Image (tube, rainbow, N blue to C red):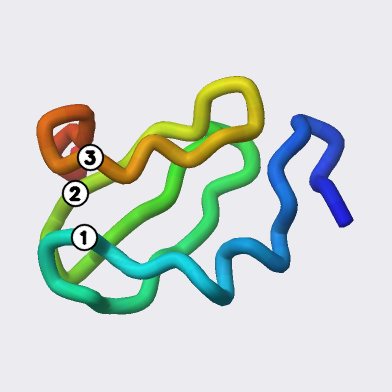
């Protein structure tokens, strides 16, 4: 099941932060995955999570 932006929300259950191996929070409005443990935000581009630390940004 997608959220209307092409991202499969069930995929979130299988994804973990590449830095901490911790849980991610999905922000549907911004199309991002948030790792509170690492203080990083990973973008979702065209429905595909970009799980590269170099592509992540710091939490605002």
The residue at which mark 2 appears reads as 40
Please state if 30 lies on the left or on the right of 11 as rendered.
left
Question: Residue drawn 63% across and 62% down?
Answer: 11
The mark that comes first in sequence, 3 or 1, is 1
SS assignment at label 2:
strand
The N terminus - image quarter? bottom right
The residue at which mark 1 appears reads as 18
The residue at which mark 3 appears reads as 52
For discs 1 and 2, the disc positioned in front in the rendered view: 1
Q: Residues within 10 Å of mark 1 (few under 14, many from 20)?
A: few
Which mark, residue 49? none
Marks 3 and 2, Cα distance to the nearest angstrom?
11 Å
Q: Determine whether 52 is above or below 12 in the image.
A: above
Please state if 33 lies on the left or on the right of 3 as rendered.
left
Please state if 3 lies on the left or on the right of 9 as rendered.
right
- Asked whether 14 or 30 is in front, the reply is 14
Q: Residues within 10 Å of mark 2 (few under 14, many from 20)?
A: many
Circles 3, 2 touching at the beta carbon (< 8 Å): no
Residue 15 position in % (x across, y down): 45, 66
The C terminus - image quarter? top left
Please state if 50 lies on the left or on the right of 53 as rendered.
right
- The extreme top residue here reads 46
Marks 1 and 2, Cα distance to the nearest angstrom?
10 Å
SS assignment at label 3:
loop
Q: Quadrant of residue 18?
A: bottom left
Q: Determine whether 59 is above or below 11 in the image.
A: above
């Amino acid at each position: 099941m997608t959220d209307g932006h092409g991202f499969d929300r069930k995929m979130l259950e299988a994804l973990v932060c590449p830095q901490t191996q911790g849980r991610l929070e999905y922000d549907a409005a911004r199309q991002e995955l948030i790792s509170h443990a690492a203080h990083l935000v990973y973008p979702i581009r065209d429905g595909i999570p970009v799980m590269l630390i170099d592509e992540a940004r710091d939490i605002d």
